[in-house]
Image: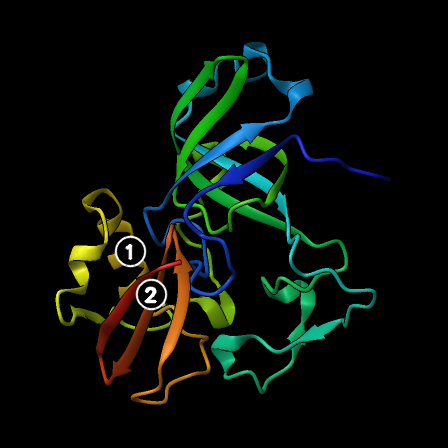
Amino acid sequence: MEIKPIAYIKNDFTSKFAVPRQSGIAEIESEIIFEKQYCDENAVRGIEDFSHLWLIWGFSENVRDNHSLTVRPPRLGGNTRMGVFATRSPFRPNNLGLSSVELIKSEFKNGVLSLTVRGADLISGTPIYDIKPYIKYSDCHEDAVSGFADKREFPLLEVEFCNGTQNKIPKDKMKTLITVLENDPRPAYHNENGRSYGFSFAEYEIKFTVEKNTLKVYGIYDK
């Protein structure tokens, strides 16, 4: 069975590095732009009655011919194998992802239908295959047990901008950047103090190091 995108997402993340590990962790605003055949206000009639949505999307950057039935979750150090269906690994037989996001607004303008959402863990350009409303009474399970992922991966980091680097980022993007940084954008199994890292964010390249519980941004450069 072939499925085709109904929309694509647009935000400030152009690479996988530093994208939040789960939806809802960082208050990143993204725009979902519908494909031409779905650009009809009737397609989202009533959607603003819901505060949150489920996105079904594709791991478009993880195209592989073969998939293993076991994977090594980063939060277990990258050394322990678990069944692929017992994890949220991006390397899956059908490359499908599921994310819960907050709906900010729906807009139809100049023939373009879009949704503005908050909390997505997707890079810009990710294909969206379906959108469903989040139903509180059935989708929220307060007594749920989450296995090896039952607790937050790491404590939040203190973020420090060095040499006036914070002045390079527009104020409307600074809050999002800080949230991404304090959630530790490094791969889960990287914990070397002093190692340099970098990632793309909006029109900038962010460079940083981590010393114990403090993340230091030492460079912000135009791409």
Identify the residue position indicated by label 1 in the image: 177
Image height of 179 relative to 68, above or below: above
The answer to whether marks 2 and 1 mark residues whose Cβ atoms lie closer than 8 Å is: yes
> Crowding at label 2, few (<14), some or many (≥20) Cα neighbours within 10 Å?
many
Q: What is the quadrant of the N terminus in the image?
A: top right
Residue visible at 47% across and 65% down in the picture: 17
Q: What's under tag 2, amino acid-wise?
A: Ile
Q: Nearer the viewer, residue 135 or 49?
A: 49
Query: Could you say which quadrant of the image residue 83 lies in?
Result: bottom right
Residue visible at 54% across and 29% down in the picture: 33
Q: Earlier in the sequence, mark 2 or mark 1?
A: 1
Residue visible at 22% across and 47% down in the picture: 170
Residue 167 on image: x %, y %: 16, 56
Image height of 35 relative to 67, above or below: above
Apparent side of residue 81 relative to residue 73 in the rendered image (left or right): right
Residue visible at 43% across and 34% down in the picture: 136
The furthest residue to the top: 42
